[in-house]
Image (cartoon, coloured by chain):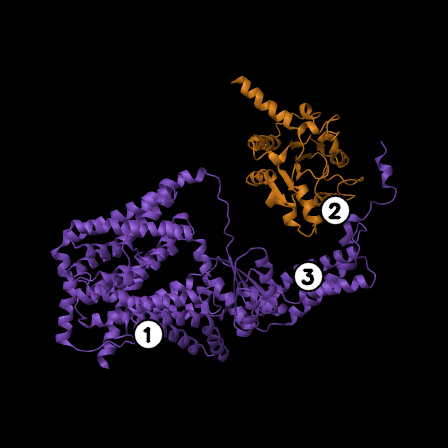
């Protein structure tokens, strides 16, 4: 059986300060079914090679945007990437069907607490709601949108052992995406895909 | 005259045969020299009594070695290492001296002799150990670093030892020697201070040390600059020798150790811009003289003593090495050196060293240790050095594999050593490169041939060294082996090519980044193996061109895109131009095809700039072109 190939587009403008995203990225880099691209390293002057990026997209089945959550959105290079690469006639429009059927997911790290991303919380919206531009971009380009993979309170994650369990979930997620064993209908309406992943862990620990 | 030629020939041929052989067998060059000496001395008996005279001459190699040790010791670096130097190194010297001295007491040696023996055996072999670390790539390991600080401390400790040992003189040996001397020859030693009262003697000593320090600091620079500006290489070598020999002479005249004086001068000159040039000039002399010294030690080994006391000497050797290793092991525990590094630290320094030979001959001259005892101990020192390669082999084959499995499970170490960058040529180009690197905390070694330029840079606190980067030995002293990157920015086109070629051939792991004058030079550098080349005027010209466009009223962001497109198209075309050039460079360089390609490239750039793509998007602004008018009708559903 042909397994799914994953394209991971990583956008972090200061990876030398990264405590969460870099370990996730480095892990993904070590997997042979993941093509891990550090966008800021590849395009330090934002001079994005449209042809190269489009051919990369063509060669993969799952697209992941990985980034720290900046102002309820992505760091700027990912927006630039969308503006340049998702061209009319390629990603949308009557002939723009290149991305149809691919899966799309955002992997984010947010500084705020999980409770803050709630209707009655400090940020008033869930991360799923705040990421709606990405969700609709996926819809318009014919990709299947999955709820975000999110880490909250990211600044203190390396102090607690939260980073470890997050990394574990990341490994699970990448494997599920690769094998295609992810039950899409059961995750479709979740706020974050982590909820699905944590239940996997809990249920298996119950069985023991 | 003929006799000297024959002697020199014998020594040289012994070294030429034995040293490369010993290195190939993994024994190191010091052992090679010793073996060469053993072969021409005790085994075949080709050389005889003159070895002793030659040995005194060869001891000058030790003086030069200390000068070089001093050159390596920048006061700042010493200060940064102070904890490991004094703690680890100091404790090693003191504890080992005391323990071995105590053992000597058990052998019924007088207290002073026991103490001198302890000091002698507390030292390890800098030459063997550092050489082996280099060969096996262990220099950067924690064990290697700690061993280095201990060796450094030992090298420094030699100086007070040389001053201290004469005070341990045995009265009966001194009187015996004096009467022998009085009977045999009556030649007065050349001395400035003979017969002076104590206070005047003290004054003379202080004055001469002050001369070395102050003169080294203030007079050396104008002198070197004067000589450097003459452009005569051999005169620079002569100047370097003049300084070392002059200081040695001055120190002998006032009755101080020449080694101490040159060491001081070395430290004073450690911050000088001429340091690397000095080092590369003195190094071959030092190497040869030290080699000669080891040969004479080998030649002087008394085989009858070895065969007569075979068991005792073997037992002493193993005992000394065991004690030294145990002391090191204990210190490693105290200073938290762990796992394989602890083994490396303890095993690598367990031998006695070349300074042991120096101290032994020095103690004999000063009537501290009787000749018979010294001869036996010399064999112990030599044997322990012979055994060192075996210890390294044990470390490699037995100990390291045991720790490797365990190490693999640990997380990777943080890489804090970003590697050194050597910049050849700091004119208008190299200077900017260096400023950017230094501003980002990258340690650089900068070399230039223009003494005035160096002077100017030094005035604004840029660390610069005088030196010809085309000379392999200078690149070597600048540390090309450990460097990560070499930046070639020298003004001479041909020499730039030569450096790139030499470094890529000899040190393939070093990345070479080079500045080219024009396209032709660019290809030549590429052909020579440079990893990255930039034409010196290209980017500034592009920038000025872009500025011209914006000044004409083009939108700055659009101009930026056009500039990038220009650059990219040229880069791509440049690849095929290079191939064409390489093909043509066998014969004529700018042949017909090359010119045709160049014209094609210009066409390609024009096309990239102006032609619309089939999707009616200007190529360089593809991404921001809006979709066609009325496209939204398709989204009605």
Q: Which chain letter matches label 2?
A: A
* Residue picked out by circle 1: B249
* Residue picked out by circle 3: B570
Look at 13% across and 55% down and name the residue there.
B309
Image position of B177 with respect to B102: above or below: below
In the image, taking residue B217 as reference, residue A11 lies left or right, namely right
The CA distance from mark 1 to mark 3 is 64 Å
Image position of B96 with respect to B423: above or below: above
User: Which hue is chain A drawn in?
Assistant: orange
Along the polypeptide, which appears first: circle 1 or circle 3? 1
Q: Quadrant of residue A72?
A: top right
Foreground residue among B578 and B185: B185
Q: Does the image show residue A2?
A: no
- Counting from the top left corner in percent of width and height, residue A145 is at 71, 32
* Residue picked out by circle 2: A84
- Counting from the top left corner in percent of width and height, residue A58 is at 68, 41
Number of other residues with Cα within 10 Å of mark 3, as a class: few under 14, some 14 to 19, many 20 or more = some
Q: Quadrant of residue B375?
A: bottom left
State how many labels appear.
Answer: 3
**In what element is the residue under mark 2?**
helix
Foreground residue among B416 and B633: B416
- Counting from the top left corner in percent of width and height, residue B209 is at 37, 69
Q: Quadrant of residue B41?
A: bottom left
The CA distance from mark 1 to mark 2 is 76 Å
Q: Which chain is purple?
A: B
């Amino acid at each position: 059986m042909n397994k799914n190939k994953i394209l991971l587009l990583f956008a972090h403008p200061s990876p030398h300060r990264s405590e969460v995203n870099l370990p996730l990225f480095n892990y993904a880099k070590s997997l042979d079914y993941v093509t891990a691209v550090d966008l800021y390293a590849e395009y330090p002057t934002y001079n994005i090679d449209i042809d190269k990026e489009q051919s990369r997209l063509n060669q993969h089945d799952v697209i992941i945007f990985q980034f720290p959550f900046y102002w309820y959105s992505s760091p700027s290079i990912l927006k630039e990437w969308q503006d340049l690469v998702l061209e009319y006639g390629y990603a949308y429009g009557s002939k723009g069907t290149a991305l149809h059927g691919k899966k799309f997911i955002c992997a984010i790290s947010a500084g705020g607490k999980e409770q803050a991303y709630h209707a009655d919380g400090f940020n008033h919206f869930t991360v799923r709601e705040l990421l709606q531009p990405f969700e609709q971009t996926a819809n318009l380009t014919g990709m299947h949108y999955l709820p975000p993979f999110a880490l909250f309170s990211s600044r203190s994650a390396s102090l607690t052992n939260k980073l470890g369990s997050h990394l574990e979930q990341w490994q699970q997620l990448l494997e599920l995406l690769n094998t295609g064993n992810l039950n899409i209908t059961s995750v479709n309406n979740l706020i974050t895909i982590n909820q699905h992943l944590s239940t996997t862990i809990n249920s298996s620990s119950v069985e023991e | 005259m003929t006799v000297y030629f024959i002697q020199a020939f014998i020594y040289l041929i012994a070294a030429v045969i034995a040293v490369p052989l010993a290195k190939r067998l993994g024994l190191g060059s010091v052992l090679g020299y010793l073996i060469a000496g053993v072969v021409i001395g005790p085994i075949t008996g080709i050389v005889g009594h003159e070895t002793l005279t030659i040995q005194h001459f060869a001891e000058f190699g030790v003086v030069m070695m200390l000068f070089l040790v001093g050159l390596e010791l920048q006061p700042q670096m010493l200060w940064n290492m102070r904890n490991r130097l004094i703690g680890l190194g100091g404790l090693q010297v003191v504890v080992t001296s005391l323990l071995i001295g105590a053992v000597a007491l058990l052998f019924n040696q007088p207290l002073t002799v026991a103490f001198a023996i302890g000091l002698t055996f507390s030292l390890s072999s800098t030459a063997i150990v550092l050489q082996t670390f280099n060969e096996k790539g262990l220099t950067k390991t924690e064990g290697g670093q700690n061993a280095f600080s201990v060796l450094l401390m030992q090298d420094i400790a030699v100086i007070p030892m040389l001053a201290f040992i004469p005070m341990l003189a045995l009265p009966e040996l001194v009187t015996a020697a004096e009467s022998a001397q009085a009977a045999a020859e009556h030649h007065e030693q050349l001395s400035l201070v003979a017969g002076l009262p104590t206070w005047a003697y003290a004054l003379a000593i202080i004055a001469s040390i002050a001369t070395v320090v102050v003169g080294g600091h203030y007079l050396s620079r104008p002198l070197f600059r004067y000589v450097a500006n003459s452009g005569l290489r051999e005169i620079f070598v002569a100047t370097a020798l003049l300084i070392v020999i002059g200081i040695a002479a001055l120190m002998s005249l006032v009755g101080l150790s020449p080694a101490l004086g040159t060491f001081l001068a070395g430290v004073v000159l450690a911050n000088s811009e001429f340091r690397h040039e000095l080092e590369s000039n003195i190094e071959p002399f030092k190497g040869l003289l030290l080699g000669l010294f080891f040969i004479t030690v080998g030649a002087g080994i008394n085989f009858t003593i070895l065969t007569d006391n075979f068991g005792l000497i073997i037992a002493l050797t193993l005992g000394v090495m065991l004690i030294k290793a145990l002391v090191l092991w204990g210190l490693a525990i105290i200073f938290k050196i762990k796992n394989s590094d602890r083994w490396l630290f303890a095993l690598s320094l367990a031998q006695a060293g070349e300074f042991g030979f120096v101290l032994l001959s020095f103690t004999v001259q000063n009537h501290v240790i009787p000749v018979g005892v010294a001869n036996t101990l010399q064999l112990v020192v030599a044997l322990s050095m012979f055994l060192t390669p075996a210890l390294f082999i044990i470390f490699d084959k037995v100990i390291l594999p045991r720790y490797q499995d365990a190490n693999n499970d640990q997380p990777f170490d943080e890489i804090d050593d970003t590697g050194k960058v050597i910049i050849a040529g700091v004119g208008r180009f190299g200077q900017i490169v260096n400023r950017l690197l230094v501003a980002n905390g990258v340690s650089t070694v900068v070399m230039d041939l223009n003494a005035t330029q160096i002077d100017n840079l030094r005035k604004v606190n840029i660390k610069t060294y005088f030196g010809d980067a085309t000379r392999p030995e200078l690149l070597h002293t600048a540390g090309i082996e450990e460097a990560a990157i070499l930046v070639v920015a020298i003004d001479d086109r041909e020499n730039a090519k030569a450096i790139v070629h030499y470094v890529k051939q000899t040190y393939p792991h070093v990345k070479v980044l080079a500045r080219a004058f024009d396209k032709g030079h660019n290809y030549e550098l590429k052909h020579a193996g440079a990893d990255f080349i930039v034409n010196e005027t290209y980017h500034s010209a592009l920038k000025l061109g872009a500025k011209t466009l914006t000044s004409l009223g083009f939108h700055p962001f659009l101009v930026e895109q056009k500039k990038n497109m220009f650059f990219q198209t040229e880069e791509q075309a440049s690849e095929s131009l290079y191939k064409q050039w390489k093909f043509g460079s066998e014969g004529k360089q700018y042949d017909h095809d090359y010119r045709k390609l160049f014209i094609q490239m210009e066409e390609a750039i024009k096309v990239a700039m102006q032609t619309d793509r089939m999707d009616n998007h200007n190529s360089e602004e593809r991404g921001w072109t809006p979709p066609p008018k009325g496209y939204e009708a398709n989204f009605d559903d």
